[in-house]
């Protein structure tokens, strides 16, 4: 774990970023890490967290945190993605400028059939969003997507900005894939579908199974679906329902669940697959869509949440009907021209809107707006982290 640096200059503004957990390679951890790297070039920046799992940021201890929040000229960048009681307690004592980095919180209705605890945490988190909006009318909300701003009822329009989450796609693309896996997928004539994301009720796994079943019934069985994502021990009922449906639909030979894997393995699955199929019903952004597009995968997705905006033009967006997804897979795989058109649109989407440098420019412009002073560019910044394991 990194320790706070000493010898800071008194005339440099202090920035404290906050989130309950700062992980190594999840979307929020990547966002915090990149922001830390950019802000620490100009300001004295520390990160406060209860669970410190990312070694590429410098953490504040309790005493340092209290000193920073007690200063009126400090900037508190609070990443809000789940209910965090301790975080709310700290904000109540904060005298500096508060910025909420809003990543969205999944509605509790998705979890109610499977986990009373997760449902309660989501409900409390969304209620916390409302309290924050009411208690801090002068705070600035930096949303990860346009869709997320719909949750910010009561927040003045001039107090809302939008900046896509930072990612590591540029580094990810440079990783050498595992040749054995990639060679096997390329030589296999089977249609290979891929979805990447945690196994959670809002991610639409049941619809993915239904799409696979309908495709096999109506077209052929020369198809396979791979789901990269770790099962959650707290969602055992959801896991059991998934496997019950697999047995009911007799899909055991056509689906593969892949848990924690190396980045080289994930790169192989992206490169070797034919289509990225996303049936998620609630996404605050969905970084895996950009990853898929960067590897040349056309995206078929449920027209829901932030997905249409993230995916950009030229991808296939559908309503919640398995037959439509199945038909789209069949048509797209038979039409090489349109397949290539979708590949081109996907790559252009990432290159024109979501490169690291583009996101950095938007973020720096937002910081200028918030602090009301000139903010020098930091073109030399590159995060020092590399991918080790994807969850």
Image (cartoon, helix red, strand yellow):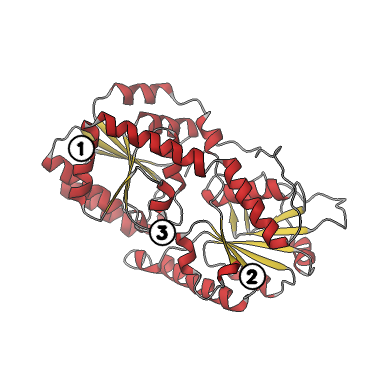
Residue in the foreground of this view, choosing between 3 and 311: 311
Whole-angstrom CA distance, mark 3 to mark 1, is 39 Å
Whole-angstrom CA distance, mark 2 to mark 1, is 49 Å
Closer to the chain start, of discs 3 and 2, is: 2
Q: Position of residue 3 (x, y in %)?
A: 76, 49
Q: Which mark is residue 234?
A: 3
| Total numbered badges shown on the rendered structure | 3
Task: Find disc 1 in the rendering and name its residue.
Answer: 331
Secondary structure found at label 1 = helix
The residue at the far left in this view is 218
Q: Which mark is residue 139?
A: 2
Residue in the foreground of this view, choosing between 58 and 298: 298
Side (left or right) of 313 relative to 55: left
The residue at the far bottom in this view is 134
Secondary structure found at label 3 = helix
Determine contact: label 2, label 1, CB under 8 Å. Answer: no
Whole-angstrom CA distance, mark 3 to mark 2, is 34 Å
Visible in this render: residue 253? no
Side (left or right) of 68 relative to 230: right
Determine contact: label 3, label 2, CB under 8 Å. Answer: no
Closer to the chain start, of discs 3 and 1, is: 3
Secondary structure found at label 2 = loop
Residue in the foreground of this view, choosing between 296 and 84: 296
Closer to the chain start, of discs 2 and 1, is: 2
**Residue at 45% from the left image edge and 35% from the top image edge:** 294
Side (left or right) of 101 relative to 17: left
Task: Determine crowd level at label 1: few under 14, some 14-19, many 20+ residues with C-alpha closer than 10 A.
Answer: few
**Residue at 78% from the left image edge and 51% from the top image edge:** 4
Q: Position of residue 318 (x, y in %)?
A: 27, 51
Q: Nearer the viewer, mark 3 or mark 2?
A: 2
């Amino acid at each position: 774990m990194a320790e706070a640096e000493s010898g800071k200059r008194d005339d440099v503004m202090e920035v404290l970023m906050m989130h309950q957990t700062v992980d190594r390679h999840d979307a929020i951890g990547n966002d915090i890490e990149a922001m830390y790297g950019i802000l620490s070039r100009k300001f004295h920046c520390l990160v406060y967290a209860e669970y410190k799992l990312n070694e590429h940021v410098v953490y504040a201890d309790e005493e340092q945190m209290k000193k920073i929040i007690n200063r009126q000229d400090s900037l508190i960048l609070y990443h809000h993605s789940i209910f965090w009681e301790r975080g709310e307690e700290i904000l109540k004592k904060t005298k500096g400028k508060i910025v909420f980095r809003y990543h969205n919180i999944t509605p509790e209705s998705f979890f109610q059939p499977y986990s009373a605890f997760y449902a309660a945490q989501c409900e409390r988190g969304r209620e916390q969003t409302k309290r924050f909006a009411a208690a801090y009318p002068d705070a600035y909300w930096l949303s990860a997507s346009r869709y997320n701003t719909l949750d910010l009822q009561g927040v003045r329009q001039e107090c809302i900005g939008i900046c896509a989450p930072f990612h590591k796609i540029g580094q990810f693309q440079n990783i050498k894939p595992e040749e054995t896996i990639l060679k096997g997928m390329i030589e296999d004539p089977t249609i290979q579908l891929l979805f990447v994301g945690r196994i959670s009720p809002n991610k639409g796994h049941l619809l993915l199974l239904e799409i696979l079943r309908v495709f096999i019934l109506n077209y052929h069985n020369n198809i396979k679906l791979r789901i990269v994502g770790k099962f959650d021990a707290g969602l055992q009922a959801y896991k059991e329902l998934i496997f019950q449906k697999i047995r009911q639909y007799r899909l055991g030979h056509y689906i593969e669940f892949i848990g924690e894997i190396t980045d080289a393995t994930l790169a192989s699955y992206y490169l070797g697959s034919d289509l990225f199929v996303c049936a998620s019903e609630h996404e605050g952004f969905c970084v895996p869509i950009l990853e898929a597009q960067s590897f040349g995968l056309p995206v078929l997705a449920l027209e829901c949440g932030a997905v249409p905006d993230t995916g950009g033009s030229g991808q296939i967006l559908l309503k919640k009907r398995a037959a439509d997804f199945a038909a789209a897979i069949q048509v797209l795989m038979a039409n090489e021209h349109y397949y290539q058109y979708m590949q081109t649109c996907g790559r252009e989407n990432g290159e024109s809107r979501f490169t690291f440098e583009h996101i950095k420019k938007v973020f720096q412009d937002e910081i200028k707006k918030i602090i009301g002073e000139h903010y020098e560019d930091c073109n030399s910044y590159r995060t020092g982290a590399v991918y080790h394991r994807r969850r």
